């Protein structure tokens, strides 16, 4: 497996930590969700670490991925992550080629 691919993947351990942190609920609407959404997307190099992953339900995930409200939802997700990781920068959530 390529180093970048591995870095962007979400491990089982990270999914478990995020699920516990988010109580298994969508951080946007409070519905049941899954801990498999990158705040900084994989296409932009977003790594699979708990500081970059949130739990979202399917409807909110779909809205965040492909609608005109994407920027608003990303802002809300960022605010949520900042509550948990106040000193963690976006730059630390992006894969850097070694």
Image (spheres, rainbow, N blue to C red):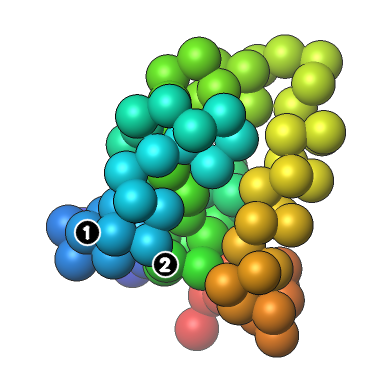
- Classify the position of the N terminus by image quarter: bottom left
Kindly indicate the quadrant of the structure image that contains residue 3.
bottom left
Q: Which residue is pictured at 50% across the width and 83% down the height?
A: 98
For image coordinates 74% across by 44% down, the residue present is 76
Q: Position of residue 49 (x, y in %)?
A: 42, 67
Residue wearing tag 1: 16
- Residue at (52% x, 25% y) in the render: 61
Q: Is residue 11 visible?
A: no
- For the residues carrying marks 2 and 1, which lies nearer the camera in this image? 1
> Could you say which quadrant of the image residue 57 lies in?
top left
**Is residue 88 rendered to the left or right of residue 60?**
right
Q: Is residue 76 visible?
A: yes
**Image coords of residue 47 (percent x, y):** 47, 62
Q: Where residue 31 sits: x, y (%)?
A: 43, 27
Above-or-below relation of 56 to 88: above
> Residue 46's x, y, as percent?
55, 56
**Is disc 1 placed on a helix, strand or loop?**
helix
Chain-order first, disc 2 or disc 1? 1
**What is the C-alpha distance between the residues marked 2 and 1?**
11 Å
Residue at the (57%, 29%) spot, across then down: 29
Nearest the eye: 86 or 7: 86
* Residue 1 falls left or right of residue 43: left
**Residue under pointer 2:** 49
74 to 39, vertically: above or below: above
Q: Residues within 10 Å of mark 2 (few under 14, many from 20)?
A: many
Q: Is 52 in front, or is 41?
A: 52
Does residue 7 sit above or below 85 in this rendering? above
Question: Does residue 60 sit above or below 56 in this rendering?
Answer: above
């Amino acid at each position: 497996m390529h180093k970048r691919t591995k870095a962007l993947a979400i491990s089982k351990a990270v999914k478990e930590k995020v699920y516990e942190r988010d109580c298994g609920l969508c951080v946007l609407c409070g519905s049941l969700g899954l801990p498999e959404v990158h705040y900084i997307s994989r296409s932009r190099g977003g790594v699979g670490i708990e500081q970059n992953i949130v739990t979202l339900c399917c409807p909110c995930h779909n809205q965040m991925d492909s609608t005109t409200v994407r920027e608003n939802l990303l802002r809300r997700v960022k605010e949520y992550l900042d509550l948990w990781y106040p000193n963690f920068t976006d730059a630390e959530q992006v894969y850097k080629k070694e």
